[in-house]
Image (cartoon, grey):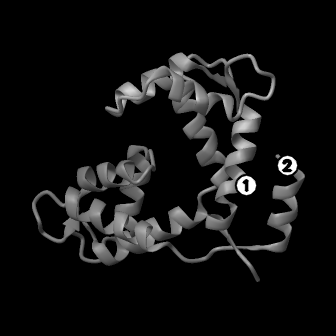
Amino acid sequence: MSLTYNKQKQRRQVKSELTEEQKSEIKEAFDLFDTDKDRALDYHELKVAMRALGFDVKKAEVLKILRDHDKDGSGLINFEDFNKLMSERILDRDPIEEIKKAFQLFDDDGTGKISLRNLRRVAKEIGENIDDDELQAMIDEFDLDQDGESEYFPFIDSLLVEISDLIFVEP
């Protein structure tokens, strides 16, 4: 982690409000996975909606959520409660952990580096047709030891500085 990022973090406070995009994602997940359109989510709908928002929850946790928010014994959670629950969870996310997860999606071979092969695979998976020169330019931006691969720490450090304005607000 860079000294610049640490100093910025010390001077700022964590945002306590979702962005409009995050609010919209919660609403979209609810609407999309409320498959029977009863304006409430059952166990299966809730589990899939939470997964779509990036939360991999176990069965016991989903059941507990439903017990905690089920006001009428129906085994359902309404949008108001879902929105509150997801808002709290999103705000509680550790941005560093989220970046680590993102890095690991690229680093499928577990080398701690992102290679041209890794980027090529991801580009193909998301349907992007990017030539090798452009992919290599992406790697070169973070390749401090010039071995042709992007190492974990420079990649993370650069992202932390770039996203700090999204995570923190001036006091």
Examine the rendered structure and indicate whether residue 44 appears above or below residue 117. Answer: below
- The disc at residue 36 is none
Q: Nearer the viewer, residue 146 or 117?
A: 146
Q: Which residue is mark 2?
A: 2
Inter-mark Cα distance, 1 to 2 = 8 Å
Residue furthest to the bottom = 171
Examine the rendered structure and indicate whether residue 107 appears above or below residue 39. Answer: above
Q: Could you tell me if the residues under marks 1 and 2 are in contact, i.e. CB atoms within 8 Å?
A: yes
Report which quarter residue 95 is drawn in. bottom right
Which part of the image, by quadrant, shows the C terminus?
bottom right
Q: Which residue is mark 1?
A: 161
Examine the rendered structure and indicate whether residue 35 appears above or below residue 156. Answer: below
Label 2 secondary element? loop
The residue at the point 72 percent across, 46 percent down is 158
Give how far across and how far down residue 105 sits, in percent: 52, 31
The residue at the point 19 percent across, 61 percent down is 34
Pointer 1 local density, CA inside 10 Å: few below 14, some 14–19, many at least 20: some
> As shown in the figure, which amino acid type bears the numbered disc 2?
Ser
Examine the rendered structure and indicate whether residue 128 appears above or below residue 75. Answer: above
Give how far across and how far down residue 45 sits, in percent: 24, 54
Residue furthest to the front = 133
Give how far across and how far down residue 106 sits, in percent: 53, 29
- Left of 169 or right of it: where is 54? left
Whichever of labels 1 and 2 marks the residue nearer the N terminus, that label is 2
Q: Nearer the viewer, residue 79 or 75?
A: 79
Q: Nearer the viewer, residue 60 or 92?
A: 92
> As shown in the figure, which amino acid type bears the numbered disc 1?
Val
- Left of 58 or right of it: where is 147? right
- Left of 75 or right of it: where is 99? right
